[in-house]
Amino acid sequence: MNKALKKLALAVTLLSPLVAEARPELYQETAYTLSNTAANAVLAFRLHADGNMQPAGSYPTGGAGSGAGLGNQGALALSENRHYLFAINAGSNDVSVFRVRDNGLELVHRAAEPGLTPVSLTVAHDRVYVVNAGDDSIFGYRFNARSGRLYPLEQSYRKLGDDASGPAQISFDRDGDALVVTEKAGNKIVSFTLDNSGLPDEKHSLASAGNTPFGFAFGKRNRFFVSEAQGGAANGATVSAYRLHEDGSVQLLDGAVAVEQTAACWLTTTPNGKFAFTANTPASSISAFAIGRNGQLELLQARAADESRPNDLAVSDDGQRLYSLSNGDHSMGVYRIGAEGDLQAVSRLTTLPAGVTGLVLR
């Protein structure tokens, strides 16, 4: 072999590991949403490095959706190691568990529950909890990460309080030792501490700073931020900031802060805790807020982006991209998040079916 061929062979040998290592980077992340149809399914979409978004599969849950809007946030959730995806089946009153593989999702289990019409679920450590809109209740499972199976937590069923409270979302705090639920109709923030067995212990209830508390997300120092639709009053939407204390009680930090839009329903925060975004469905807009050091909220842009009736939001793990679902034109949009919380459109896919709910990124 002459010197030129030897050099070429050496270059190919050195380059091969780099090419192999780069293959996973052909796409930045996968977005998952739930069809919520009679034959319920998780829908996957991949955002590629060039900004192009493409469908990446449809995976039946084995259960049934409701076929109608759920008024919820959190229909899907990922396990902490991101190896499993959990999905609610609002029409069949159960939860589906998928193993996340490189080539797609594998359905490994369905678990029934005593509540009616599950609308939101949350995961922490080896616990999964669901909130049910049909009977205003919560219910928990123990999760086996080896088998992917859910086991009912006996005696975990709890009523939220008054009937027709209209729960929208349930979420663990960041430590995984307490639960928070928003009640749209009850205008309350409800929280539960958990005992050593993972069962709900003491219950706390606080009147919401704004009416119709809907979606929320935790930020730094056990603070969480809630969107308030204010009953759909024109340009009346607000956002409030709360702190969850170790004893499970909730304290108002700031609110209700005006969004200057109608019906802020979904809310997400960036991982660094600096920004919050709300989806304002009737106003067809996304608003941006700055989060201060002490949890105070400052409206940056009432219309940081225009959408067609947005109905969910999610932020990428690196905090650089905001995803949106929009039922008005059945689309999924991607925005680049700027240093000042500004949004720049990156991509939009307009082939979603009507009525999708839930949005998580991996």
Image (cartoon, rainbow, N blue to C red):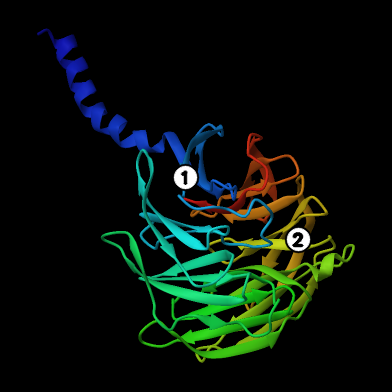
Image quadrant of residue 160?
bottom right
The CA span between labels 2 and 1 is 40 Å
Residue mark closest to the camera, 2 vs 1: 1
Dot 2, crowdedness within 10 Å: few (<14), some or many (≥20)?
A: some
Q: Left or right? Give the position of 223 relative to 122.
A: right
Above or below for 100 versus 165? above
In-image side of 62 versus 167 (left or right)? left
Q: Where is residue 136 in the image (x, y as percent from the top left)?
A: 62, 76
Q: Is residue 218 visible?
A: no
Q: In which quarter of the image is residue 312?
A: bottom right
User: Who is closer to the viewer here, 17 or 31?
Assistant: 31
The secondary element bearing badge 2 is classed as strand
Quadrant where the image shows the N terminus: top left
Across and down, in percent, residue 126 comes to 35, 71
Q: Which residue is under mark 1?
A: 60
Residue position marked by numbered label 2 in the rendering: 300
Question: Which residue in the rendered view is the most extreme toward the left?
Answer: 1
Mark 2 is on which residue type?
Leu
Q: Which residue is drawn at 39% across and 80% down?
A: 154
* Residue 319 visible within the image: yes
Q: Which residue is drawn at 52% across and 53% down?
A: 360
Q: Which amino acid does label 1 sit on?
A: Pro
Give the camera-side residue of 303 and 127: 127
Tag 1 or tag 2, which sits nearer the N-term? 1
Q: Which residue is drawn at 45% across and 50% down?
A: 62
Residue 314 locus on image (x, y percent): 58, 54
Position of residue 342 relative to residue 28, above or below, is below
Identify the residue at the far top of this view: 2
Viewer-proximal residue among 302 and 115: 115
